[in-house]
Amino acid sequence: MDLNFPVNDKVIYESNDENRSINILSIIRSKEKSLANSEKKVSEWVQINAQKVVRMSMAQVAHECDVSDTTVLRFCRSIGLLGFTDLKLSIVRDISKPHEEILGEITPSDDLRTITQKVFQLNAQALNDTVEVINFGSMAEAVELIRNARRILIIGVGTSGPIVRIAENYFLRLGLNCKSITDSYLQLMEASLLDKEDLVIGVSHSGYSLDPVHTVKVAKERGSKTICITGNDQAPITEYADVVLLSVSREERAETIASRLAQISIIDALYVILSIELLETAANNEKIIWDAIMSKMV
């Protein structure tokens, strides 16, 4: 399988890359948590008024956001663009895509049908946004680290717990030596015993939760390779990660749902890629597993 993507590339995208079309609003959402407070005002306004931006000057946008021209320019550069003109061109390109849709927020006045439709749309948008910002070089490097690791420790706390269990389920099917742990003390104990032949995969939507950050840090200090799956590429957990896999969602609530689907989809993709790479082993293990499971069927 051809995995000749560039690796060790921290840049999510290049604005002048004609070979890959990436939604600029997805990029803005992925960077939002790492922006300065004044830049967040610009970010929020641009996301709501994207179509207006293309007809405005930088000074007009600054006036609408009640910030300086310099703040608008700094915002553009913080999200990886060269300047304000680059932002306008990116928005024009994205507006021309017929499939783009700005989702409405769920309100107390929405009926059951509307709420259900909006939830599904929100989940679908999170998947679309995430695949737009995925660094395929990082995906390729993650595949190599997982395949070559002697031991794999998958960690997460809180709502990330089910995600790490799913990852363990997948990787066990490939015959990989892996373990998922959601207890913060056990994570640290395991990480402290790893070495350069091992790998830690940390899952944290915010990237700020103390326990996964500390566990990945300890593993890194022990010489282990590290991967993090997070919704913020500037979060503390990324400082100790050899590979960062970014997920994106529009959710504002603390109990995120769509983001989990995006992170699970990243794990799904890693599993499928590894299954193809390890096709004979995967097929043989799947047969053994199903033979064992069938004995429990009525």
Image (spheres, grey):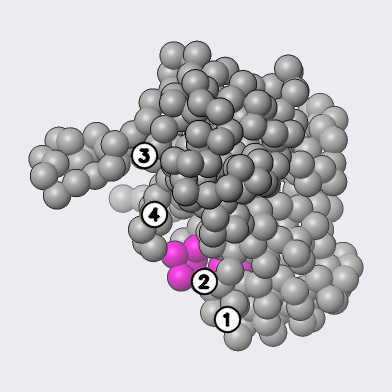
- Quarter of the image with the N terminus in it: top right
Magenta stretch: give its range: 154-161
- Which numbered disc, 4 or 1, marks the residue that appears first in the sequence? 1
Instruction: State the image quarter where residue 169 is shown.
Output: bottom right
- Marking on residue 122: 3
Taking depth in this image into account, of 116 and 184 the one nearest to the observer is: 116
Which label lies toward us, 3 or 4? 4
> Under tag 3, what secondary structure?
helix
Q: Which residue is mark 1?
A: 184
First-in-chain label (1 vs 3): 3
Asked whether 95 or 113 is in front, the reply is 95
Work out whether 145 lies above or below 92.
below
Q: Are marks 2 and 1 in contact (CB under 8 Å)?
A: yes
Tag 2 and tag 3, C-beta contact below 8 Å: no
Q: Position of residue 279 (x, y in %)?
A: 72, 35
* Image location (x, y in percent) of residue 59: 56, 36
Q: Position of residue 121 (x, y in %)?
A: 34, 34
Circle 2: element type: loop
User: Which tag is nearer the camera, tag 4 or tag 1?
Assistant: 4
Q: Quadrant of residue 51?
A: top left
- Residue type, numbered disc 2: Val
Give the crowd class for mark 4: few <14, some 14-19, many >=20 residues within 10 Å: few
The residue under the point 36% across, 58% down is: 253
- Give 193 or 134, whichever is nearer the viewer: 134
Residue drawn at point x = 57 percent, y = 81 percent: 184
Indicate whether residue 158 is drawn in magenta. yes
Q: CA distance from mark 1 to mark 3?
A: 31 Å
Q: Is residue 291 visible?
A: no
Residue type highlighted by circle 3: Leu
* Residue type (three-letter) at the residue carrying disc 4: Glu
